[in-house]
Amino acid sequence: MSNLLVILVCLTIGLLLQKNRRLPDSFALSLNTYVIYVALPALILFEIPHLTLDSRALLPVAFAWLMMFSSALFIWFVARRAGWSRSVTGALMLTVPLGNTGFVGIPLVEALLGSDAVPYAILYDQFGTFVALNTLGSFVAAYYSGGVVSWKKLAKTILSFPPFIALVVAFVTLFLQFPDWLSGVLQRISSTLVPVVMVAVGMQWRLRLERDLIAPLTVGLVATLFLTPLLAWIILHLMGINNLAAQVVILEAAMPAMISAGVLAINYQLAPRLASSLVGYSLLLSLATVWAWRQFI
């Protein structure tokens, strides 16, 4: 409960800081930079050595891709039937399959399932959502906007991303034991992830809604917060899997739209207001729906 209170308080602080004109426009971006370059790599280096490499470690990665492809197929089908524009379809194809499994997902998973669940959440995010954002996400954005991306640029983006580098280092040194002082430093730095990222999210929150966007927004919210985790639960239930890794999969599948996916849609001019609204409203609603999914599983 204390972790959830930290999330809510820091999110509220971020919302209040939006009205502070003394802060530079780039302040939230600076907080995100700190998270990407410092806090998240520290969390990965601290948590991954506690991961037991067995079939449960493969479960989050496999389901991350299965959920993303399933939700993308659903959006493509609905958008085609509804006759939505390429811009609206592209925005939904980015923001619905790509959940906020890192910045929001990891803190919420830790709050609801405990620290033992964090390594599985990291695997779901880093080997699933993150890779998809920087590969398929870039192609989706380019396709629906008419642009072109290169494999060289995609590879450079992935290989130079600090959390991905930290993940590689963590696996390379998996069987080495860090000295106590280094583990302590990593733990203290990683503990700043939740408050900093939630303040940054609050500062970037935009909740503008327009009438012509109600239908695609509603479809996007239902798919993101209800249908995708429901599909994950059904498949896992049929497979008879209900361990900690499976619970992480369901909660990660229920996460709100990724802020970076919304930014990508906006940068490519793919229904910018829809993208920002879906990110904002899904984040607001997810604080209740993710908790509800935790009670359900």
Image (spheres, rainbow, N blue to C red):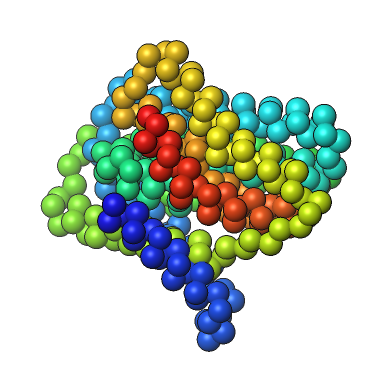
What residue is rendered at 37% in x and 14% in y? Answer: 240
Q: Quadrant of residue 195?
A: bottom left
Residue nearest the viewer, comparing 160 with 48: 48
Q: Say if 69 sits above or below 186 in the image.
A: above
Kindly tell me whether residue 167 is visible in this rendering.
no
Residue 70: in sight, yes or no?
yes
Q: Is 143 left or right of 171, judged from the image as shown?
A: right
Image height of 290 relative to 8, above or below: above
| Residue at 40%, 60% in the rendered image | 8
Quick check: 76 above or below 163?
A: above
At a point 13% along the width and 52% down the height, the residue shown is: 180
Quarter residue 113 falls in: top left
- Seen at 50% across and 61% down, the residue is 201
Q: Position of residue 267 (x, y in %)?
A: 72, 57
Q: Nearer the viewer, residue 121 or 12?
A: 12
Pick whichever, 11 or 28, lies toward us: 11
Q: Residue furthest left?
A: 180
